[in-house]
Image (cartoon, helix red, strand yellow):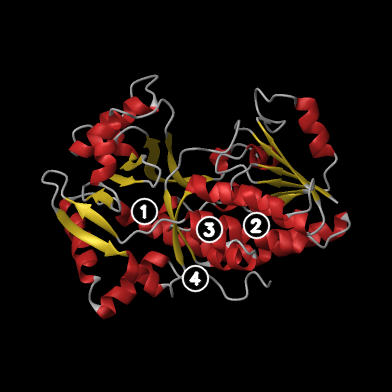
């Protein structure tokens, strides 16, 4: 049996590995020229943590993880700490099953894990656009790989071209939450790296939030979130670096230094969810953010990508004909959709409080975070941040 996986992100690479271990031949088609170098820090826990443990990936993920003692909130004008989240308490609320990972590092772990499959069973084709995309290179080769596949898995992200080819324009299925998020990493800032080594610092601000943290290789990372209406009506042709400098310039002096070094093409995208009435058609099925984007506010995008991919491939892996594959896809949706809907609901709730719209909401968040040091409040707050662990018996593996 052969599979074509569109997208070499978390869901795509996890799907490719698991199918190859089940005896399939797999081609992964990725539009980028190589693994992504930029990204943001993620909390990895919940169903994805459980799936990674079953897949035998935890040792490699632990090696790639960062040790974060606390997330600090600071007054952007004075630089004084206003509140913090103790990550040891967060981890304790999750029974220690929490890792802090940079998105590119998680991708590299999954890419390396393809080597666990039989030699030659997985082939990753970088610079290969999905045949339906404008400007697709080598369309004949891509078409050949797709036509010869028993299953096509569309794991090409929130702006999925595979989804568009199946169900139409993304405007029908993308649900923006009124926010945007940006992230990038810079080299050559030793003074910033030293100042924020071992620290993850966020501004305690209204409508906008800027974060800064140091990486182990000497680089410094920026995380920026803002309300779309806070950006105002952008001038025609405004690029992402210019927009970020306009929105965040003057907010906080360390961020001004990072903005001066913003690369030409930072990650900068809408915070949104994907809501679809169905996730498959014919021999093609969607995975990861292409069908189940919960938004980064829910905090479990990467976790759900891996857990969903494990479930999907556990069902498809034993199949030997089209009828069995169709049944597997139906079962995947039946078992996984309730989990996604639960996490999306949590993400929508978080969207209302993630960026305080006024000083009153800012103070409420600050007091809640300060109160999280109390034993009873701590458990409630940390469980709320975690968003629950999902439905029991979902994966069934």
Q: Residue at x 43, y 40 (%)?
A: 270
Q: Position of residue 187 (x, y in %)?
A: 37, 33
Query: How far apart, in angstroms, are the residues tagged by discs 4 and 1?
Result: 19 Å
Label count reads 4
Mark closer to the chain start, 3 or 1: 3
One can see residue 274 in this view: no
Mark closer to the chain start, 4 or 2: 2
For discs 4 and 1, the disc positioned in front in the rendered view: 4
Left or right: 101, with 336 as reference point = left
Query: How far apart, in angstroms, are the residues tagged by discs 3 and 4?
Result: 19 Å
| Label 4: which secondary element | loop
Residue that carries the numbered disc 1 in the rendered image: 351
Residue that carries the numbered disc 3 in the rendered image: 61
Tell me, yes or no, whether the two marked residues, 1 and 2, touch with CB atoms within 8 Å.
no
Query: How far apart, in angstroms, are the residues tagged by discs 1 and 2?
Result: 26 Å
Mark closer to the chain start, 3 or 4: 3
Query: How far apart, in angstroms, are the residues tagged by discs 3 and 2?
Result: 17 Å
Q: Residue at x 72, y 59 (%)?
A: 313
Tell me, yes or no, whether the two marked residues, 3 and 1, touch with CB atoms within 8 Å.
no
The image quarter in which residue 27 lies: top right
């Amino acid at each position: 049996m052969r599979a074509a996986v569109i997208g070499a992100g978390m869901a795509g690479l996890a799907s490719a590995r698991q199918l190859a271990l089940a005896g399939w031949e797999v081609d992964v088609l990725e539009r980028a020229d190589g693994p992504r170098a930029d990204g943001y820090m993620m909390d990895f826990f919940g169903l994805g943590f459980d799936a990674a443990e079953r897949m035998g990936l935890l040792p490699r993920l632990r090696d790639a993880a960062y040790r974060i003692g606390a997330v600090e909130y600071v007054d952007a004008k004075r630089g004084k700490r206003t509140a913090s989240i103790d990550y040891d308490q967060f981890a304790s609320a999750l029974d220690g099953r929490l890792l802090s990972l940079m998105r590119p590092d998680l991708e590299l772990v999954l890419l390396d894990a393809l080597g666990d499959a039989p030699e030659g069973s997985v082939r990753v084709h970088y610079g290969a656009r999905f045949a339906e995309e404008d400007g697709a290179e080598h369309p004949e080769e891509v078409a050949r790989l797709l036509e010869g596949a028993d299953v096509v898995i569309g794991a090409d992200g929130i702006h999925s071209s595979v989804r568009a080819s199946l169900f139409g324009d993304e405007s029908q299925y993308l649900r923006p939450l009124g926010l945007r998020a940006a992230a990038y990493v810079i080299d050559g800032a030793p003074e910033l790296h030293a100042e924020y080594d071992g620290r993850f610092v966020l501004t305690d601000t209204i409508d906008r939030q800027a974060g800064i943290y140091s990486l182990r290789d000497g680089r410094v990372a920026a995380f920026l979130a803002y309300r779309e209406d806070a950006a105002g009506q952008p001038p025609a042709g405004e690029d992402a670096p210019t927009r970020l400098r306009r929105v965040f310039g003057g907010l906080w002096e360390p961020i001004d230094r990072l903005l001066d070094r913003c690369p030409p093409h930072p990650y900068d995208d809408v915070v949104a969810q994907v809501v679809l009435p169905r996730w498959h058609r014919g021999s093609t099925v969607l995975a990861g953010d292409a069908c189940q984007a919960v938004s980064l506010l829910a905090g479990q995008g990467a976790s759900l990508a891996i857990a969903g991919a494990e479930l999907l491939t556990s069902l498809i892996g034993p199949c030997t004909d089209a009828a069995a594959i169709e049944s597997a896809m139906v079962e995947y949706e039946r078992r996984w959709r309730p989990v996604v809907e639960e996490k999306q609901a949590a993400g929508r709730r978080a969207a209302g409080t993630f960026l305080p719209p006024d000083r009153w909401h800012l103070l409420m968040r600050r007091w809640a975070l300060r109160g999280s040091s109390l034993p009873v409040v701590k458990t409630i707050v940390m469980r709320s941040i975690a968003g629950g662990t999902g439905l029991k018996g979902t994966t069934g593996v």
